[in-house]
Amino acid sequence: MRRLRALLCGTATAALAAAGLSGLAVTQAAGADAAADQLSNRWYAAAPYLMPLDNDPPDATAIMDATGLKAFQLAFVLAPNGGGCSPTWDGTAPVAGDTAVAGVIDAIRAKGGDVSVSIGGYNGTKLGQACGTPEATAAAYQQVVTKYGLHAIDFDLEEPEYENTAAIHNEIGAARILQKDNPGLYVSVTTAGTAAGTGWFGQQMLNEAKAQGFTPNNFSIMPFDGGFQGASAQTAALTAFNGLLRSTFGWDEATAYAHEGFSGMNGRSDSGEMFPQDAFRTVLDFATSHGMDRFTFWSLNRDRQCTPPDNGGRTSGTCSSVPQSAWDFAKFSVEFAGATPPDNPPPTDPPGSGTCTLAAWDASAVYTGGQEVSYEGHTWKAKWWTQGEEPGSTGEWGAWQDEGPC
């Protein structure tokens, strides 16, 4: 996905408390021992993407508490940066020895949720490129399915991988093998979106799936970073993609929508397109009214407000660049799954809680330049004399400087 992978995916971090491990021991998952009860497929279809090791991972369990979300799409499994046909997180952390992501999964499952794992993405070397055959590629992915006891997996097939016919043959073949060898496994395939639905390489991928006799739960497109201005352009692309699915597989319109999905980007896209909450509402209504199988977005790491809210007209991997309350976009996923998110969710980091040790900001107190307080899980430093001005309320021109999470 054109999702800030090359520029904004930092090195892996062990800040597991920020990823949902509060109060839980980090344990290494081992296949069925780690598996929770399977959720309905609708939850896996609604699961938003979360990078558990990069881009300032939020507390997954806090998102669950605040929104009612139950499923997360953890990203991304890749080939090792140094080469080889074995699964790693972000190309650097081998799945075989992982405890960090396993701990995140444990925390989610302990609250009644579950995860899907996404392979591929825009950045890094994909296993379909590194492994020589569909069977070898499937064996690498099977390690991931077995280790984490997965009930769902997402194949994110995009450039440059989907321009490589051998790699796409391996990925589609691996998806078919996993589907056969793991009965009930929910399989989604995500690829680039265009005004025509998808481009030449996306169509080539569909043709490969047809040739191999492979039908996933859905084929999803990403209608962003391609000149999409607003929700109407996105729904038009979804309509066009429905036509491509019909012509490729011989499906009628309803069957094609039942195998179609949407994967959006919340807020400001990499190319500067804007998809605020009302755009998500429009696409969600389209998806549900047309019986589409999947509605997801990139990403929960970005589902929070920047400081200032528009982030100076820049795209970020850790906030949306649009005015919002935390987890506004996650609520659309909850609705798609068929649940009702709470109207007034509790704050994810109330003042003075968590690891914040500084005194909480007091609206009645007088502060002078250099004094520090805690507020909504962050440390704030006064730039000058101030009283009654809420930290962050007036952006970068206000009296408070955000020094980051406590």
Image (cartoon, helix red, strand yellow):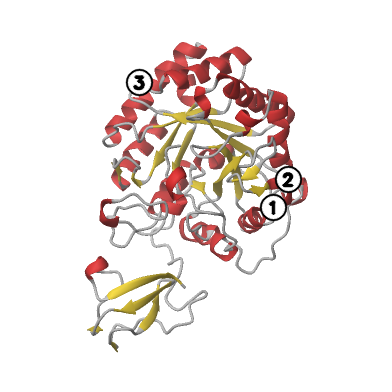
State the residue at coordinates (28%, 61%).
308
Alpha carbons under labels 2 and 3: distance apart: 39 Å
* CB under 8 Å between discs 2 and 1: yes
Residue nearest the observer in this picture, 130 or 344: 130
The amino acid beneath tag 2 is: Lys
SS assignment at label 2: helix
**Neighbour class for label 1 at 10 Å: few (<14), some, many (≥20)?**
some
Alpha carbons under labels 3 and 1: distance apart: 41 Å
Alpha carbons under labels 2 and 1: distance apart: 9 Å
Give the label on residue 98, or none: 1
SS assignment at label 3: loop
The amino acid beneath tag 1 is: Asp
Give the label on residue 196, or none: 3
Above or below for 61 versus 366: above
State the residue at coordinates (41%, 23%).
198
Look at discs 3 and 1 and give the one toward the viewer. 1
Above or below for 372 versus 23: below
Residue nearest the observer in this picture, 181 or 99: 99
Give the label on residue 354, or none: none
* CB under 8 Å between discs 2 and 3: no
Residue 24, horizontal then vertical, whole percent: 66, 66
Give the label on residue 147, or none: 2
* CB under 8 Å between discs 3 and 1: no
Above or below for 308 versus 244: below
**Neighbour class for label 3 at 10 Å: few (<14), some, many (≥20)?**
some
Can see residue 390?
no
